[in-house]
Image (cartoon, helix red, strand yellow):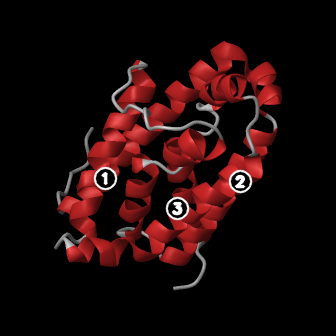
Amino acid sequence: MGINFIEVLASFMVLFAVIDILGSIPIIIDIKSKTGKIEPLKVALVAFLIMLAFLLVGEPLLGIFGVDISSFAIAGSFILLLLALEMILGIQLFKNDGPGSGSIVPIAFPLIAGAGSITTLLSLKAEYHIINIAIALVANIILVYVVLKSTRFFEKLLGPTGLHIFRKAFGIILLAIAIKLFISNTGIELGNVR
């Protein structure tokens, strides 16, 4: 149950694709222009605490409802599929229309620590050790903080076209991850396709 670099990397990539902080830069910049300022440290800490709490107590909470991790992982694979379709097709299936504005709502929750990332954390628990997921989560939150601190830099560096391409590429990766999660938690075995 030690630290496994492959599991950390795989968990990091899944969370990175789902949180999609780089793809969220245009939304963050828009919110910043409307609210005046964003507090990167506050956003990162609140998002981290929400996701860590769900990582640690999400399973017992599901037990109250009689749902196991594999079932939740299958449900999570559908959420990931829909998120991937949003990224690839440029459509909006999930609405972020909660009350309030600023650093906590809607950036920390639900933009960063939303349904997709929470579902993903629980889905990953069905595949990987919790310590490796936690390390990947910390690495992603550090990246979230860095990106929030330097949104203008990333906007200039990538430009609208670069952000668009980056979002599409991670959408395809997320789609493949959703299919893998579904297959591995249903027990379906696929032969080698030639």
Q: Are marks 1 and 2 in contact (CB under 8 Å)?
A: no
Question: What is the count of numbered marks?
Answer: 3
x, y percent for residue 90: 43, 19
x, y percent for residue 70: 25, 66
The residue positioned 53% from the left and 58% from the top of the image is 10
Whole-number angstrom distance, CA of label 2 to CA of label 3:
12 Å
Whole-number angstrom distance, CA of label 1 to CA of label 3:
17 Å
The residue carrying pointer 2 sits among few (fewer than 14), some (14 to 19) or many (20 or more) residues within 10 Å by Cα, namely some
The residue carrying pointer 1 sits among few (fewer than 14), some (14 to 19) or many (20 or more) residues within 10 Å by Cα, namely many
The residue under label 2 is 42
- Please state which of residues 31 and 151 is positioned toward the viewer in this rendering: 31
Q: Which disc number belongs to residue 50?
A: 3
Secondary element at tag 3: helix
Q: Can you name the residue that lies furthest to the bottom here? A: 1
Secondary element at tag 1: helix
The residue positioned 59% from the left and 32% from the top of the image is 24
Say which quarter of the image contains residue 31: top right
The residue under label 1 is 76
